[in-house]
Image (cartoon, rainbow, N blue to C red):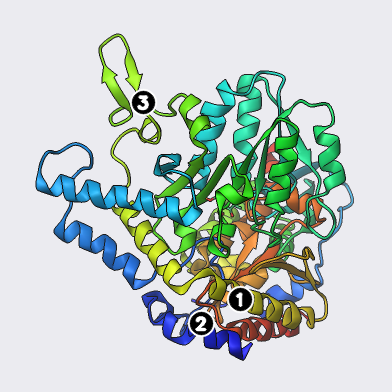
Amino acid sequence: MNADPYQALVMERSRKPLFARRPHGTDAEGEGRNRMCGDAVHVFLARAGMHVGHESEGCAILLASADLMAEAVAGKSRDEVFELQRDFLAMVKTGQEKPALGALNALAGLASFPARQRCATLPWDALSEALNNG
Amino acid sequence: MSDVLHDLNVESLRKEFPILSQNVHGRPLVFLDSAASAQKPRTVIDSMRFVMESQYANVHRGLHYMSEKTSDAYEAVRDKVAGFLNAASRDEIVFTRNGTESINLVAYTYGRTALKPGDAVAVSAMEHHANLVPWQMLRDAHGTELRIVEITDSGEIDFESLERVFADGKVKLLAVTHMSNVLGSYTPVERLAAFAHERGARILIDGCQAIVHRKVDVQAMGADFYVFSGHKLYGPTGIGVLYGRAELLEAMPPFLGGGDMIEHVSFEKSRWAKPPHRFEAGTPAIIETIGLGAAIDFVNEIGFPAIAAHERALTEHALSVLGNIEGLRILGQAQDRGGVVSFTMRDVHAHDIATLLDRQGIAVRAGQHCAEPLMGRMGVTSTARASFALYTLPREIDALAEGLLRIQRMFA
Ligand SMILES: Cc1ncc(COP(=O)(O)O)c(C=O)c1O
């Protein structure tokens, strides 16, 4: 288990996100807000091909998590995305990395920071909303 | 600063606070979150232990030795608090659970009787939710209006806005903080009380922050109601205070019903006890109240002149070292401000600041500080906040500044 949630990958993607955009063919959207701190994430979803983009305002953890999520779900089926989400939530809680999570494992350090787990899971809530809106 | 530290021997005072010798993430704890809740000196901890080990029973109920001893110790704290606030009488001191409950008590009882539908309550734009939400609830239940007094960009009460809010004569209660838990600004409570009284309104002052830093004299300031929480004043949680002027408390109906708050009960009807017991239904927080008494003794022994001078020096030091950090913005520039400093840092979110400082053993608060509307007013979504107490050292503020610079390098 990795204790530092501020891995180089997290810092990099929070500064230079690769998926901070509205994908071509967007046909569903979802939103996540944290009332405690004012963080907000808006997710755009093009269901054909599961292309996800986001517009996020908040801490480094939220920004990186949204971006890594968009990357991880690309091309997956709806069921696969929900399975990935379940695995991700479990990993953030326990700190147990899982090969299937790939780059998302960079956030495993959050297990030691319960107050910050919500920052990482918020984009996934927004994505679920988009999937369920569709 | 050296002569101030000479007045207040902080290093030796710190030994009175057992928790301050703890390590966090392998580093000595630098606790800069005292505005949320202060740490407890040994004398408070010991006083509570002593009651439980040697003289504990329920209060006001037993005709036996233990109950009498406990009742005496409990009621002695009422005298202590009355003296601490310079209240005219001990009967003006009501024990509650915290400042929040004190304000709710006033909103519920005074609000629904002395205020009539159509009357207005005014609060400032820098209130803690504790002094905003109860008045929204009163508005919705009772038909009073709620008005907001603007603050200036520097974080002070805007007296022109105050004039406008009072212009039509409908405001019957001004509920205002004595010190902002976000901006650190003190409000000119004497002037505000005089302003309200000249216009036929009463004033409730939220002293949750100010009580820790300044000598409060409710008579001199003209307070009708003054509230605070024990836990920010180095006392335990679970005990708060409502000061209310005698004539106001006497006219107010009870808040909660039950034991201890009645004089006579039949199945049909009850006659209320006189204040303050009318407002203390049920078994009170006996042990915590006694702990609060010890906290007041502790603070009195050090004395507000030394406490205030120490905190003024710390605040100046903090404003200067944090002010030197590029990209750091301190919220509010009130002339009269105390040991609470909220800030944002370019390109680094407040939550990242708090988590990364925590890893260096430094505790600050991050978020909206129970003052969401104020965040909007200051144009931010959240801030980090460092707050100081009588045990805070200048070098802890230096550690904060170094920590912030380290974080900046990480995010550069
Ligand atoms: C200005 C102010 N008012 C009210 C409160 C509420 O205090 P408590 O939570 O102890 O009731 C606080 C505490 O954060 C405060 O800072």
Q: Are marks 1 and 2 in contact (CB under 8 Å)?
A: yes
| Residue B126 in sight | no
**Viewer-proximal residue among A59 and B43:** B43
CB at disc 1 and ligand 1 closer than 8 Å:
no
Indicate whether B255 appears above or below B220. above
Q: Chain of mark 3?
A: B
Residue sticking out furthest to the right: A24
Q: Which residue is mark 2?
A: B8
Q: Which sits in the foreground, B392 or B157?
A: B157
Q: Which of disc 3 and disc 2 is earlier in sequence?
A: 2
Could you tell me which secondary element the residue under label 1 belongs to? Answer: helix
Q: Secondary structure at mark 2?
A: loop
- Decide: marks 1, 3 in contact (CB < 8 A)? no
| Amino acid at dot 3 | Gly
Residue receiving disc 1: B309
Residues packed near mark 2 inside 10 Å, few (<14), some (14 to 19) or many (20 plus): many
Q: Given the image, on which type of amino acid does mark 2 rest?
A: Leu
User: Which quadrant would the C terminus of chain B be assigned to in this image?
Assistant: bottom right
Q: Residue B59: where, in percent of width, then height?
A: 23, 42
The quadrant in which residue B369 appears is bottom right
Q: CA distance from mark 1 to mark 3?
A: 44 Å
Q: Nearer the viewer, mark 1 or mark 3?
A: 1
